[in-house]
Image (spheres, rainbow, N blue to C red):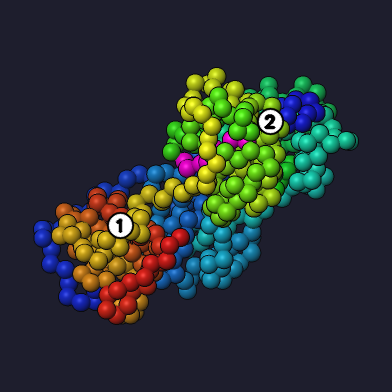
Amino acid sequence: MFRMTFLAALTLGAPLALAQAPAAPAAEKAKPAQPAMCAACHKLEANQMGGYLDSAAFKSQSVQLDVGGAVPQILRFDAKSLKVVDDGKAMPTEHLKDVKKRHETQVTWVEKDGAKFITEIHFKGPVKIDPKNVIDYAGVAKLVEGRPGGATYTLIDSRPLLRYQEGALPGSIHLPFIGFDKFVDRLPKDKAQLVVFYCGGVTCTLSPNSMKKAQLMGYTNLRVYREGEPDWKTRNYLVTTPSFVKAAYVDRDIPHVLVDARSAEDATSGHIKGAVSVPVGQMAVVKKSLPEPKLNAPLIVYDGRGGEQAVAVARALIKAGQKNVLVLKGGMVDWVAAGYAVESGVPAPRQIAYAPKPRAGSLPVAEFTTLAKNTPADVLILDVRNADEAQQGMIKGAMLIPDEELVARIAELPKGKRIVTHCLTGIRAEMAYHKLKEAGYNAAFLNNEILVAKDGSFKITPR
């Protein structure tokens, strides 16, 4: 790839009476020990797991770990004896509260009383890279935007295909570390040309390891943008294609917003189905309805084909605080050519409506409220808080089994009912949900903060 701009390469009360004999918990389904992507670089012992930290609950002394399968791993810990290490440094157990969600994690565990207990938990620190091989955001932006003094370069995304499809740096090509040797023909023939690798951030090893492979092949001008895609998308736009939108968002039912950057006049021939009209210079039309930046809403901007209008609107969205803005390469022309849904007429200016996909098993606040206020005979509200918390008040008719006791007491629950769990914040409720699902129960949980008064009334804080 040669030097280019994007446009060129664009109840503490009475126990519940059981309606039927308790069924034995279902056998635990086999789960991976770590995500497939991690397995390419990290080899685990039989009593180890690796993945991403979903949550840590000190009340039940439990951790939820995403190991890459459909169901996360729920592990217990003893706060007095747990060894916590972050970037090679020993930390107090309370450090678990400070670790960001989705941080790369490796645990060592032992089995005790039928549960997996973590003895050590290690959090990955930044990957060490020789400073001479590091390039920062400003340096990459200079290359991508074709500023004076920019070099001929090749920009490589080392992440798996799905991550690349979700959004990539403008002008980058896909050469995943997993499968690197199959795609080496994507490297430039000139081994002295500048090659920049990036991946999923400072703790991700995919791009540094890709660089090492290229070094062994004789490439001499290599750099790693260590902050990678997570950093870039907070400052600049990503790019995608019609087929990638379909594969990464539509086919996987991932919420996103399509934004038409063309003028109303240009859009008279039709627009992408469901798109919001935000012509260049008219950000005020939707500014008040923009999603909270923390939601990381994918906003995919397109124009006719050239890219100038889409880039202008994308930059305006980023300036307004959005952190996941993408430009659709090829615009409306390539969308139509791919045979994807188009609506006739002009997309009327309207608010951007974005609702994140709820976590599996979570209930809308309105549905939980209805069930809790008038619980049907085939539903059980299960309070998984600790006894001291429940003394402050419980939902009328609810049953109390603290999350940390659930596995040992699961036979107390009727199989013929839908079990709806809640706690104070939703963290333990979700952990309990996964335990119930594994045991074959019809379960759901409230993924919100809830305060219950002595009289059984409650207040839920929307997310």
**Depth check, front residue: 83 or 29:** 29
Q: Is residue 198 left or right of residue 405?
A: right
- For disc 1, the marked residue is 367
Say which element carries label 1: helix
- For disc 2, the marked residue is 307
Q: Is residue 187 left or right of residue 16?
A: right
State which region is magenta.
254-261
Q: Amino acid at mark 2?
A: Gly
Image spot of residue 421 (x, y percent): 31, 61
Residue 259 inside the magenta-drawn segment: yes
- Asked if 436 appears above or below 373 in the picture, the reply is above
| Residue at the right extreme, as displayed | 149
Say which element carries label 2: loop
- Asked if 236 appears above or below 330 in the picture, the reply is below
Image spot of residue 201 (x, y percent): 65, 47
- Asked if 452 appears above or below 141 in the picture, the reply is below
Image spot of residue 363 (x, y percent): 34, 55
**Depth check, front residue: 23 or 458:** 458
**Depth check, front residue: 11 or 345:** 345
Q: Tell me the distance, in whole angstroms, between the alpha carbons under discs 2 and 1.
A: 43 Å
- Going from the N terminus, do you reach mark 2 or mark 1 first? 2
